[in-house]
């Protein structure tokens, strides 16, 4: 919604919740921007290729990519199964690789692009979910650095946002997530993160950076 209000046409990807995606598209339409909802599991290569092709057919080239697909299963370290480890790393980290790889060729051709990856304070502090989640989010920061370096001469910036305990379903359903963990004493809002995404989409001179939006939990 923040990107639409800033002037972008927006493709809305969803995995299961078609009604929520349709509601977002309705709101975007009211801003006067074009929009399109598409179902795809972004951890699956074939889905990603289909998704990008359909977005290009409906809205044109992808100039701004926000990688924000994630799952969180709170577990103690010794309780994490191999299957859970693989699932979290696939959804949270592999998806960033797959979707970025699918759109970056067009960005290179046009010599312009913005890639915004959602990491987490978990990459910096360990967080409140578990080692599998922290590892996936730390991997996003490393991938951000690598892509930023390789694309720096192509007019493409690649940055990460590392939020902490933003008031979403993922956080409110986690029994380990308490506002007491935050020095400010309360959860953040989605608008706190969205405003940073818009800033990164508009900025020409920031790349390879991780912007922390965390109420003071981690200071860099």
Image (cartoon, rainbow, N blue to C red):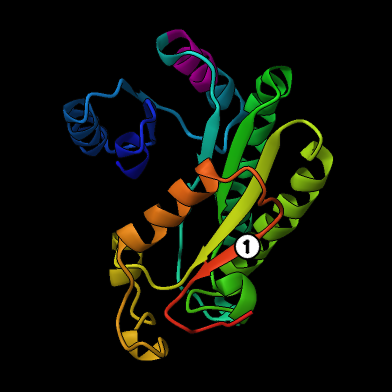
Task: Locate residue 57 relative to residue 4 in the image: left or right.
Answer: right
Task: Locate residue 182 relative to residue 102 in the image: left or right.
Answer: left
Residue pictured at 71% horizontal, 32% vertical: 155
Residue pictured at 33% horizontal, 71% vertical: 188
Residue 202 location (% of width, % of height): 51, 42
Residue 81 location (% of width, % of height): 60, 66
**Residue 80 shows in this picture:** no
Name the magenta segment's main secondary structure: helix
The C terminus - image quarter: bottom right
Task: Locate residue 66 relative to residue 187 in the image: left or right.
Answer: right
Q: Is residue 211 above or below residue 15?
A: below
Q: Is residue 179 above or below residue 162?
A: below
**Residue 153 shows in this picture:** yes
Residue pictured at 31% horizontal, 58% vertical: 191
Residue pictured at 29% horizontal, 41% vertical: 1
Q: Secondary structure at mark 1?
A: strand
Counting labels gives 1
The residue furthest top is 57
Magenta-span inclusion, residue 55: yes
Residue that mark 1 sits on: 210
Residue 5 location (% of width, % of height): 29, 38
Q: Is residue 9 above or below residue 94?
A: above
Magenta-span inclusion, residue 109: no
Q: Which residues are magenta?
A: 50-57
Residue 44 location (% of width, % of height): 58, 32
Give the class, few, some or many, for how many residues have Cα within 10 Å of label 1's Cα (few <14, many ≥20): many
Give the image quarter of residue 151.
Answer: top right
């Amino acid at each position: 919604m923040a990107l639409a209000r800033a002037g972008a046409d927006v493709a809305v990807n969803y995995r299961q919740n078609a009604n929520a995606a349709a509601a977002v598209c309705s709101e975007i339409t009211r801003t006067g921007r074009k929009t399109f909802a598409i179902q795809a599991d972004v951890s699956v290569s074939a889905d990603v290729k289909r998704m990008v092709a359909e977005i290009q057919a409906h809205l044109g080239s992808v100039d701004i990519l926000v990688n924000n697909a994630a799952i969180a299963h709170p577990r103690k370290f010794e309780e994490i199964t191999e299957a859970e480890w693989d699932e979290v790393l696939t959804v949270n980290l592999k998806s960033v690789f797959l979707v970025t790889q699918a759109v970056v060729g067009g960005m290179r051709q046009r010599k312009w692009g913005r890639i915004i990856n959602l990491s987490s304070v978990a990459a910096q502090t360990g967080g409140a979910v578990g080692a599998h989640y922290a590892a996936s989010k730390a991997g996003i920061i490393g991938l951000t650095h690598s892509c930023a370096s390789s694309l720096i001469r192509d007019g493409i910036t690649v940055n990460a946002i590392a939020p902490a305990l933003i008031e979403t379903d993922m956080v409110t359903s986690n029994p380990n997530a308490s506002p007491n963990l935050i020095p400010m004493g309360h959860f953040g809002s989605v608008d706190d993160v969205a405003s940073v995404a818009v800033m990164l989409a508009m900025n020409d001179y920031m790349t390879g950076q991780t912007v922390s939006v965390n109420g003071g939990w981690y200071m860099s």
